Structures are given as structure tokens and as C-alpha cells.
Amino acid sequence: MTQTCLPSSALAPQFNLPAQLSSSIYSSHLLLGQQRVVDSFVLCSKLAEQHLFLADFPGVNRVKFIQALTLQASTPSDAYLVASKQNGDTSFHWQDMVVPENVGTITVKDELFTYLHGKITRAQLIGKVTKKANATQYEAGALAKHHYVYICVESLWKREKLWELLAQIIEDGQYSVNSELAPIPLNCKIVLVGSSLFFSHLREEDKLFMKQFAMLAEMNHELDLTKHSEHQYMQWLQAIAEIEQVQLDISAIRPLLWYSAKMVEHQQRLSLNMIAMGQLIAQANVYSNETQVSAKAVSTAIEKQIERHNSSEEYAAQNFDDKFITLPTDGDMIGQINGLTVIDTGDYSYGEPARISTTVHYGDGEVADIERKSELGGNIHAKGMMILSACLYRIFGRDAPLHLNANIVFEQSYQEIDGDSASLAEYCCLMSAIAETPILQSFGVTGALDQFGNVQAIGGVNEKIEGFFKLCKRRGLTGKQGVIIPRANILQLNLEPEVIIAVNEQQFFIHAIDHMDQAVELLMQLPAGEADEHNTFPDSSLYGKVQQRLDRLAGHEIEAETPSFLARILKRLRSTE
């Protein structure tokens, strides 16, 4: 049997941390991993008539990020809006030269950037004209006061007239505040800030959008550690801490990196969620009794954060402990297996084992999904069941139809189930029921199958493992319990220390597999078996037992054992002699 058991070193990310913190931190450190955005912004700043769409994500501190980004381009010199008369008509134009005292200056563009969001008004955008003592005075808006004007696209889109006004301003290259004032030339760079989905929506809905905002700068929400270093991320964390006015101790970096890697579910990637990391650092500062935030304070903040959101998990655990939900974690049973699921409450997700059972009987070859028939199964789960059926027929139904019906169900499940991550467990359960061979109940199983039996990656692997481990730990670890997961999920492992300790002490096992045959061999302690040139499996193998049961259901053995009419007559004649 191929070695499938994972060592404890593979269960969490391994970081190479520097010995001390960086002494100097700049706002540019907030741009870590955003070189694509920086390049797009710098290019846009050098193009006269093209504006930019900055596609961010909910975890960005927009003001701080915009401030750091704007400093990457050459700082424009102040510009002066002056009036001139020609043929009796007054017109405005911008100039970089300092205006002489005898020349009237309408306004000065001397501020680098602004960010408009919330309830944006027309006056905020283009300014307004006020009258004082029979004199008309222009109060400049964002377009006239700032070199770079960032606008929240969701806020602008809600105010339809302002959206149309901005589009018209960009198209005309100027704007009018009112009928008394001459048009003011547009002399700033406009950057819309929103999600990439909003960008795609605008491309479809607004004909002028792609002409006016031809450039997209899409932010990365995670950092690839194969391209960047832990030292660079540490500087990013220090920059976040400065925003929160918190001092970090070097010991705090490791748990912060662990938490960050857990957010993106990858051992070689880290989260660039400025808000989430900033909130955690601020909370850790409250729990710290020192001037600097230590590892202990960060760990406490993480534990308290979980406690604030895990009430559903605790209630579910009580149902298992009170035996309201039946799910054995020792012994063996035929046609029953422990699947692993994830419950997502919106702000928190946790793993919960689920008992899956299968019965088989003579029929026309249907593998029935009771969840689907009862309208509790989603479309992806139904797809997984169809793939499971395809695997069954690929192995045992190549030359003839199968004469069995099977019923597969998630026991004690009263809400919709979706996803294909249970297809491996359902397949193993089906093999057990057909072969009448028991499955070890000390295992929890997750994995998605393809039609060739390969086990594919699934989501929520850490929550699933930890959910089954917690149940086993409450009942008492026996040294035989464990989980079976897809090998493709190894890079996503980032387990709690208590799980890693139990694995290291061989009290709990995590098996990573590539093919469904490896799973059935672990669960039923039998070789899966290899077919010969006649597609016949060895009698002592699991698939041999499945084949024998299918033959019995098809009546093949009955026909072989029942004597023919002529044989019965001959036997009778011999008995009378």
C-alpha cells in the first residue's frame, strides 16, 4: 500500500522569519504585492486623456492605500486657474506658472488627492458659485482643487445624475458650474474605486465607460511567498500596526503570519486584508500588558475572536455529546461512513461530521440520491452523485447492465446539502454495502471524485479535519482515529496546534490520497484489487467481493448451481436403479 500518512511537519506553514523587526517603515510598504496596480497608476498619470479604474476588495483601507499609491507617481506642480478675455468673451485656462499679482486667480490646484465616497454632491465634485455683497465667487470642487480625484464607484452609481455628469465632463474635457461662469477645463486624473465585478458590469452597461476608463488596476488580495519574502510581509504588518498606533514585538510576527495564511487557506500565501489584520492587531494591543504586542497577546486575540463567533459550533457539539446525533468514531459497520462537512454561518465556519449510509438491493442499476429526491440536495451534490455512478459503471458495468439499486443518504440532515466533496465517502460507502464488508468508523472522509476515480481537492479542509478531531478528542483519542483527505489539499493545511501535537504523538492520523482505491483499502483493510484481461478481480480483494455480489444479484451463480431439466431426470433415473 502506498504511504499516505502525513507527518506533522506538513500540517501547517513553515516560515523563515528574520531575527528582528525593521527599523524604518514607510507608506510604500502598504503596496506589497501590488506592483500591477502601481505600474498601471504610474502609466495612467502620464497619459493625458485616459483615466483609471482601481479594482480593490472589501479588506482594503482605501484612504491609506490611496495615499501610498498616489505618492508613487511624480508629484505634479501647482496649477492656477486664470481667466482671459478674447473678443469680449471670458474663458478659463490652467497654467503652471505663478500668476502675477495683477492677474486674477480663480482657484489654485495645490492638493495632491482626495477620495469622494458616501453621499457625494454636485458641489463636492465641481464646486459652486456663491454671491456675497453683489460679488460672484467660485468655490472650487474636487476636480479643480486636486490633481488626483478618487471616487467610490458604488456611491457615484447610486446618484444617476452625477454619474452622467462625470461621464459628460470627461467626454467634453470641461464642465460648467452654472450659466454665469465660463466652462472650466478638466485638469485632473480621475480614478474610480470599486470591485472587479463592478468594472465588468460597467463595461456591459455603459458605452462610454471603456473609452473613458480604459485602464484597469486590479489589486491582489493575497501575497505569494514564492515571489516575496516573509521579511517584506513583516514590513507590511508593521505599516498596518502604525496605522493602528501599535508597536509589535518580533514574537508577534509568527502568529500573525499563521492567522494570515489561515485566512487564504494556503501554506505559501498570505492575506493582504488590511482591515482584518489591523483589527486583530488592535485587539491584541488591548490584551497586551506590555508596550509592545507579543505572541501571547496575538494568540489571545485570536482565541477571543473565535469565542465571539462560535456559538453555533458549540451547540452542534452538544448535540453530538448528548447523543442526539448518532455518529460512531470507533468499531466498524457495513454501509456506513463518516463524511466531513463545513457549516458556514456567514461570519464563521466550522467542520461537522455527517453520517452517510447506503443500502443496496436488486434493481435496474439506479444509484438514488435521497437528498436530491427529498429536495435537500443542491445541483453540485447531484453532479457528484452522477460521477459516483459513472465510477461504478466504469469498473463493473462495462459489458452488461448492473442489476442493483442503491440508496445513499446523509442521516439526520435537515437542511440543504451541496457540493461534491462527499462523493469519495459516498463511493466507499457504496462499495461497503455491495461487498458486505465493514468500514472502520474511526475515520472521517472527504474528497471529490472524477470519473476515473482520481480524488480532487475540496474546500474547507482545515475546518473538516478540526471538526472531526474535536469530536474524537471529546470522546477520547484512541490512537486509531484519523481523516482521509485529497493529496491536492496538502498545501492548504494550517491546523490548530492541538491537532499537530496529536498527530506527532500518533494519537490522530491524517491520510492524503490520490485515488479512491487508496481510500477503500484504508477503510476496509482489504486490497482494492486489479482486474485481469477478462475484467475479473481476485476473489479475496474488495472489488472481487463487489463483483461476486453483483453476479449474485444478476442471477449468474443461481443459474450455475440450479441443475437443468435433463440433469434432474437423469439424477432421478439413477436413484431408481
Image: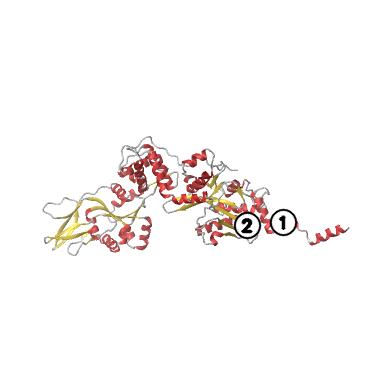
User: Which SS class for mark 2?
Assistant: strand
Contact flag, marks 2 and 1 (Cβ < 8 Å): no
Considering depth in this image, is 97 or 161 the residue closer to the camera?
A: 161
Q: Is residue 473 left or right of residue 22?
A: right
Position of 151 with respect to 553 (left or right) is left
Drawn side of residue 560 relative to residue 154, left or right:
right
Place of residue 165 in the rendered image (x, y in percent of width and height, measured from the top left): 27, 62
Answer with mark 2 or mark 1, whichever residue precedes in sequence: 2
State the residue in front, 286 or 249.
286
Neighbour class for label 2 at 10 Å: few (<14), some, many (≥20)?
A: some
Q: Residue furthest bottom?
A: 179
Q: Quadrant of residue 252?
A: top left
Which residue is label 1 attached to?
557
Task: Report the front residue among 122 and 432.
Answer: 432
Measure how far apart labels 2 and 1 are at the Cα level: 18 Å
Residue 1: x and y in percent read: 60, 43
Q: Residue at x 25, y 47 (%)?
A: 75
Instruction: Check disc 1 and report its element: helix, strand or loop.
Output: helix
- Front tag of 2 and 1: 2
Q: Position of residue 275 (x, y in %)?
A: 35, 48
Number of callouts: 2
Q: Can residue 228 be seen at all in this image of the molecule?
A: no
Tell me what residue is drawn at x 34 percent, y 63 percent: 207
**Residue 194: in sight, yes or no?**
yes
Graded by Cα atoms within 10 Å as few (under 14), some (14 to 19) or many (20 or more), the crowding at tag 1 reads few
Identity of the amino acid at label 1? Glu
Q: Which residue was labeled with disc 2? A: 360
Q: Amino acid at mark 2?
A: Val
- Residue 87 location in percent, x, y? 13, 63
